[in-house]
Amino acid sequence: MSEVLMSGLVIGESARWHDGRLWCSNWGAQEVLAVDASGESEVMARVPTTLPFSIDWLPDGRLLVTSGPEGLVLRQEPSGDLVVYADLSAYGGLNEIVVDGRGNIYVNGGCDFHPGEGERPGFILLVTPDGAVRRVADELAFPNGMVITPDNSTLVIAESFAQTLTAYDVSPDGALSNRRIWAPHTGDGMVMDADGAIWTPGWADNGPACLRIAEGGEILETVTLEHAGFACTLGGPDGRTLYMLSADWHMQESFESNLDRLLSNRTGRILTHPAPRPPAGWP
């Protein structure tokens, strides 16, 4: 049975386990939060944007935040201030971020809630440790959460509007190739475990759920949710706690209507559930 660790968020996103606490973006409140095992939260950064914004860390431990509508990747300084790390505004709006074991930064974007018929405007950008930027994937149907395998050889991304988890081979220089279907399921903010399975928010026959999916598409475990899931990660002392972020998003309503309702009625929660295996890979 899942337990509520924290409530009162607007929309929790970009779940990460870092330095002994759960970190997440609190969309609508412009906050990056860190939450301990008792549910006590601390504001770690205030982000001057609307949404989306997502988080990860450089190898030296500095926090990175995507300022989505502005097309910027921000870096937190020791003072706590956020400065521009990479200006990617020429490519369009940004969404999720993941930093791999080599220090390469992958950022996706082009998330259009109302694309034209047949249009797939999503992309993935690579920012290498020397600051060079290049586009490494295109034609994505609403790119969302990403994970990278422990050996840095495979990147998996959720294409939410295509109801697909899509995989790419990652070359030593960070390029992506050999696009393929990893599993025929939708996804959002996700995490890989030590068996190579992926936990991601999705849908079961009876409504919203967090799913543990094997490569190829077999559903290994289903955790039902009262409200739609936005992100999940694994953490806790032994890495076997599944943290799930949910909010009362109505799929039949427009993006704008959902946001207006959630800004005035904070239904966002952090839920926990036992997991069979600890996390692996990135983030």
Image (cartoon, grey):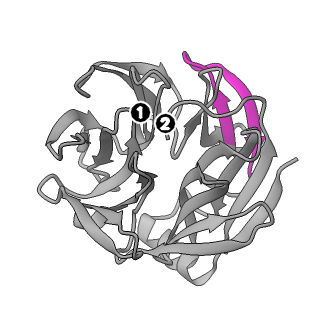
Residue plotted at (69% across, 45% down): 235
- Give the secondary structure at mark 2: loop
Residue 178 appears in which quarter of the rendering? top left
The residue nearer to you, when weighing 115 against 94, is 94
Q: Dot 1 surroundings within 10 Å: few (below 14), some, or many (20 or more)?
A: some
Label 2, label 1: how many angstroms apart (C-alpha)?
Answer: 7 Å
**Residue 9 makes an appearance in the image:** no
- Res. 282 mark: 2
Residue plotted at (63% across, 80% down): 265
Residue that extends furthest to the left in the rendered view of this protein: 90
The residue nearer to you, when weighing 62 against 56, is 62
Question: What is the three-letter code of the residue carrying label 2?
Answer: Trp
Position of 49 compared to 88: left or right?
Answer: right
Span of residues in magenta? 210-226
Residue that extends furthest to the bottom in the rendered view of this protein: 264
| Location of residue 31 with respect to 136 vertically, above or below | below
Q: Is residue 161 on the magenta stretch?
A: no
**Residue 238 makes an appearance in the image:** yes
Q: Answer whether labels 2 and 1 touch (C-beta < 8 Å).
A: yes
| Location of residue 105 with respect to 84 vertically, above or below | above
Position of 70 compared to 38: left or right?
Answer: left
Residue plotted at (31% across, 46% down): 107
Question: What is the three-letter code of the residue carrying label 1?
Answer: Gly
Q: Is residue 220 on the magenta stretch?
A: yes
Where residue 74 sits in the image (x, y, percent)? Answer: 31, 64
Where residue 191 sits in the image (x, y, percent)? Answer: 57, 38
- Give the secondary structure at mark 1: loop
Residue at the disc numbered 1: 101
Query: Which of the two discs, 2 and 1, sits closer to the camera?
Result: 1
| Location of residue 86 with respect to 69 vertically, above or below | above
